[in-house]
Image (cartoon, helix red, strand yellow):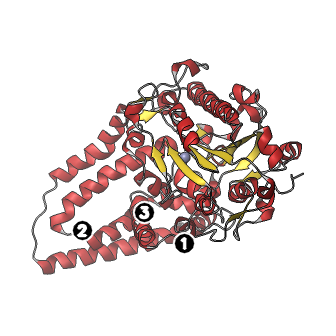
Amino acid sequence: MLVALTTVHTLLLCLVLVRPIARPLLALLIVATAFATYYMQRFGIYLDPTMLRNVLKTDPAEAGELFGWGMLPHLLLFAGLPLLVLWRVRLKPQRWARAMAWRLATFAASVALLVGSLLLVFQDFSAQMRNQKDVRYLITPANFIYSATRVATDSLQEAQAARTPIGVDARLDGYWSSRTKPALLVLAIGETARAANWGLNGYARQTTPQLATRDVINFRDVTACGTNTETSLPCMFAAVGRRDYDERRIRTSESLLHVLNRAGFQVLWRDNQSGCKGVCDGLPTQQLDKAAFPEWCDGGRCLDEALLQGLDTVVRDAKGNLVVVLHMLGNHGPAYFKRYPDAFRRYTATCDTGELRQCTRDEIVNAYDNALLYTDHVLAKTIDFLQSQTSRFDTALVYVSDHGESLGEKGLYLHGVPFAIAPDEQTKVPMTWWLSPGYVASFGLDTACLKRAAANPQTHDNLFHTALGLLQVRASEYEPSLDITRTCRR
Ligand SMILES: [Zn+2]
């Protein structure tokens, strides 16, 4: 395999490497490969197109947390040393005929070596490639070159295509005929919170003490659509979802929010992250103004409580029905310790660096759980706010996380393992609802029935149709069988 992979790279370089660009191109590849292998080895990630898209779309604050002095030895060895060799190689100009002959000979020798080496391991190799397709995304630098090219061409096509409208026939229906109050739904989109550590799911630690004292509906078995934000976020707001997964279709279609907007809801996306990934295109958005909330924001990042600041004004000025999306920073890693204020540093000792390998597993889990405690606090505060608005609105909160996280299980850290082979830690997420008594009454919901439904397995695929059900919006995209609330009406 070593010979085969080396010759594959030689072959590819033979096609593009000419003298004027040889040195800069090789230098670039060497440095990029050193970075790539660092993260692959540290976190067990695969550089497939999805992961590359995720990497390329992060904002500087997010990326900054992934750099640290701990990378230096790896970079010196795997970039510094090869660069030194590269710098010392002298490139001699040759007549083109001779150069051509050399190149052809190299090409032919590489092909022979490649075929020969593959024949030796063919049976194992072909079985491996059939059964574990994703291992090819461990071949570096071919993996990131291929993935980056795919992302670039896909993005270009997506940018050219106008989003396909959905829900063009959306309208308020059913229980709306007898309603008096407008509805206010807060959709809190969590980040990197995993089901296994969610207190309400029966985790050994009570990481959700405040939600536990409120009358919430907790879904114990929810599967995410992807293992990273770039995949999950557009997917969970799409009508098609994972069951019929088509990334291109999802990225070029409008989302749940556009459907609700067509049905007459005022929609607002409040973001404490790297944007809505196209889900809120053309709809009102608020990126947190870091300067405005010194109490919550520091060093380019804000704590999630900042998302609640000014929400009262938004609600006060609302005319009619309102849906507010709070895009949380949640448990975004690897710097979990930065995701909560000191008051929530309840489990100690914590891992106080982004270099997870320098910490023990307990320290990593402690920091991660503290961040969950803080999410619990933010959600409880949101519920209390919604409670205070019940004289004007029928209010509800739906919280769901975008994907989970590996905290060292099976040697994996962070998230983004290809969905087909991803462990439960990365795909199982918490989902928790709170419905005001007024909401339950005027939408004719049966909470006991919903609590029973919450014990059944659900997925992100349910979100689109359940939101339409919860808000009694009818549209041709609505599939009743995926609406969790459908069988729980009085
Ligand atoms: Zn995410």
Q: Is 471 positioned to the left or the right of 39 in the image?
A: right
Asked if ligand 1 lies within 8 A of label 2, the reply is no
Cβ atoms under marks 1 and 2 closer than 8 Å: no
User: CA–CA distance between discs 3 and 2?
Assistant: 18 Å
Q: Is 120 positioned to the left or the right of 477 in the image?
A: left
| Nearest to the observer: residue 173 or residue 38 | 173
Give the mark toward the camera: 3 or 2.
2
Q: Few, some or many C-alpha atoms within 10 Å of disc 3 (few <14, some 14-19, many ≥20)? A: some
Percent x, y for residue 18?
A: 20, 69
Tag on residue 5? 3
Tag on residue 17? 2
| Residue that mark 1 sits on | 164
| Nearest to the observer: residue 348 or residue 461 | 461
Q: Few, some or many C-alpha atoms within 10 Å of disc 1 (few <14, some 14-19, many ≥20)? A: few
Give the mark toward the camera: 1 or 3.
1
Residue at the image point whose x is 79% and y is 54% from the top: 484
Mark 3 secondary-structure assignment:
helix
Mark 2 secondary-structure assignment:
loop
* Residue 27 sits in quarter: bottom left
Q: Earlier in the sequence, mark 3 or mark 2?
A: 3
Percent x, y for residue 346?
A: 61, 19
Residue at the image point whose x is 21% and y is 46% from the top: 84
Residue type highlighted by circle 2:
Leu
Q: Is residue 444 visible?
A: yes
Vertical position of residue 249 compared to residue 327: above or below: below
Vertical position of residue 98 compared to residue 305: above or below: below
Residue type highlighted by circle 1:
Thr
